[in-house]
Image (cartoon, rainbow, N blue to C red):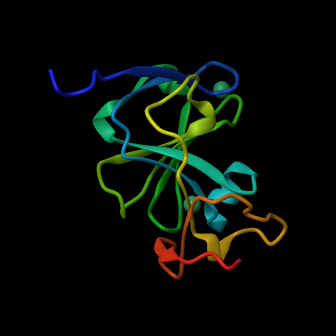
């Protein structure tokens, strides 16, 4: 009774071929500025919601899901029809799936609360919010923002 009810939220790629759902509680929600993520998504940074792997379920279009193994032994999964990047699974975070937040339809159990890999960030983007920052070689060392 003390546990808050788990909530399942649906998501999909942009063409709708791949559908999935994620079940709360999430482990984190944060923006990643690493080069690898920026290129994979064609964006200044990528916002992920992280879940234990068994809380992410592909509900349709599993055949459309293409898995790409990166040079860092991570796996990125995207829709083979429309190219939407959906899931990241890395050896540093075993048994976790990092889901592209933009592809989850509704509200989840938390808002993004941090920036990671800030030392690798695009030099044409300025982080202008008050969220925690992490960087250094590992990408996840706590940083004191320069103000
Ligand atoms: Zn698609
Ligand atoms: Zn990244």
User: Residue shown at 28%/21% (left/top)?
Assistant: 5
On the picture, is 93 further left or further right than 103?
left
User: Residue shown at 63%/27% (left/top)?
Assistant: 13
Return the residue nearer the eye: 76 or 100.
100
On the picture, is 13 further left or further right than 56?
right
Write down the quadrant of residue 147 in the picture. bottom right
User: Residue shown at 53%/67% (left/top)?
Assistant: 71
Residue 25: give x, y in percent of width and height.
33, 35
On the picture, is 109 further left or further right than 48?
left
On the picture, is 13 further left or further right than 49?
right
Residue 64: give x, y in percent of width and height.
56, 27
Return the residue nearer the eye: 147 or 74.
147
Residue 128: give x, y in percent of width and height.
74, 61
- Relative to 54, say whether 18 is above or below: above
Instruction: Give the quadrant of ligand 1.
Output: top right
Return the residue nearer the eye: 82 or 13.
13
């Amino acid at each position: 009774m003390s546990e808050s009810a788990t909530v399942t939220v649906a998501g999909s790629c942009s063409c709708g071929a791949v559908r999935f759902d994620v079940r709360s509680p999430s482990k984190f929600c944060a923006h990643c500025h690493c080069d690898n993520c920026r290129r994979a998504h064609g964006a200044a940074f990528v916002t992920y919601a992280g879940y234990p792997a068994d809380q992410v379920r592909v509900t349709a279009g599993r055949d459309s899901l293409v898995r790409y193994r990166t040079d860092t032994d991570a796996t990125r999964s995207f829709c083979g029809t429309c190219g939407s990047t959906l899931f990241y699974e890395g050896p540093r975070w075993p048994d976790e799936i990092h889901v592209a937040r933009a592809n989850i339809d509704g509200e989840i159990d938390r808002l993004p609360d941090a920036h990671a890999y800030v030392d690798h960030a695009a030099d044409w983007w300025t982080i202008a919010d008050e969220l925690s920052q992490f960087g250094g070689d590992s990408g996840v060392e706590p940083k004191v923002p320069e103000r």
